[in-house]
Image: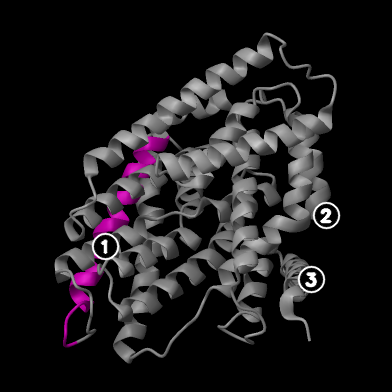
Amino acid sequence: MDTSYNFLFDLALILLCTKLLGLATKRVNMPQVVGALLAGLLLGPACFKILKTTTFINNCAEIGVIVLMFCAGMETDIDELKKSGKASFLIALIGVIVPLLGGLGIGFIFNKPSLIESNATCTPLLENIFIGIILTATSVSITVETLKEMGKLKTQAGNAILGAAIIDDILGIIALTIVTSFADPNVKIGLVLLKILGFFVFIGVIAVAFTFIYKKKYVNVKKGLHRHAILAFVFCLLLSYIGEVFFGVADITGAFFAGLIISSTQRTKFLASKFDTLSYLFLSPIFFASIGIKVELKSMSVAVVIFAVVLTIIAILTKIVGCGVGAKICGYTTKEALQIGTGMISRGEVALIVANKGQSAGLLGDNFLGPIVIVVVITTIITPILLKLVFKIGPVRQVSSSNSLGQGYEEIDHYRVGN
């Protein structure tokens, strides 16, 4: 039997199961993204072992999260994002410090030979700090999909979550670099910070050039709409690639800024509809299922299981408290502070990537990897559920509708959720 075409079966199974479980979770008033995550868990090594991670699934999932963040950028109101810039920075900063301290504290309690033996090559203190850094990670893609599904992405809280998540990503890179530099002398902190600064300068130049070309009508926005969609996708992929490869910034950050730049054009509504269809039909189900498929839980001692439970609770509470306190300081209501903190809970693939980097650098022992996976699984599944609950608490403040998407995109989201 020719196994070179197994990816077709894998794809069919993922699309079918994510849709069926998505509809099932919708029937019990949970976001459909929860069903997609559960589908990956059930199909993967953690449950029925039908599917395993492949290069095809990984690559499609990466494109899926890039398109998801690209769409989020196109939906974001630039003026409102500017207004919430300082608030987003403070929310992200406190939302990084509190989980970092929480992870450090819980590591200090459990990371002992009498409780959990570690084979990390660094000092226990450095390993405990690294556990805290893992908890600082935020996977905003889960939140974005959930908010889109509920029609709450264009709210004051949704805008703050997006801004804070981007800054959170930058702060996480800096923290990871600093800790890694202690274990690897080849890592230069100054160079990393210079690259991050260079990335934002680069984005500014690209944004000015892009806007100039469109405003001067060097591009005919009334003809060749499908050509515009292809060029927009190329623009998204290039900024994702440049951000990751040349500046060391996550590819999803480049994708978000690509969408943000395009959001000022006249054809954003048309472009958003095309990418929303692509994401819904093919890419998003693969991305969310891939998170579950990656999960492999090995046998753990009682102490490790207790550590995993406590670490999960700390991971949830520290993001809610840290980001929530930051939001309250910035003048958001208590309800919005709770929504923002809840939206930052999910660790997703970001925490797994950080954990794998730490393990390869000798900063994380094998016994601590299992609990990290449990944190990722639980926070990823629980975030959409909690988000739906906290957004039900009274009315929400919408952002001013200056974005060119307008009502047209709301109709697209309504069609998407209803079908």
**Spot occupied by residue 108 in the image (x, y as percentages of width and height):** 18, 71
Asked whether the beta carbons under mark 1 and mark 3 sit within 8 Å of each other, the answer is: no
> Residue drawn 59% across and 45% down?
69
Nearer the observer: mark 1 or 3; the answer is 3
Image-quadrant location for residue 332 = top left
Among the two numbered marks 1 and 3 on one chain, the one whose residue lies closer to the N terminus: 3
Dominant SS in magenta: helix
Among the two numbered marks 2 and 3 on one chain, the one whose residue lies closer to the N terminus: 3
* Residue 309 in view here: no
**Spot occupied by residue 157 in the image (x, y as percentages of width and height):** 53, 41
- In the image, 322 versus 294, the foreground residue is 294
Is 92 a magenta residue?
Answer: yes
> Residue drawn 45% across and 44% down?
245
Asked which secondary structure carries label 1, the reply is helix
| Magenta part of the chain | 88-114
Other residues around mark 2 within 10 Å, as few (<14) / some (14–19) / many (≥20)? few
> Residue drawn 63% across and 48% down?
68
The residue tagged 1 is: 130
Seen as rendered, the residue at the extreme top is 216
Is 80 a magenta residue?
Answer: no
Which quadrant would the N terminus be assigned to in this image? bottom right
Question: Mark 2 belongs to which amino acid?
Answer: Gly
Among the two numbered marks 1 and 2 on one chain, the one whose residue lies closer to the N terminus: 1
The residue tagged 2 is: 418
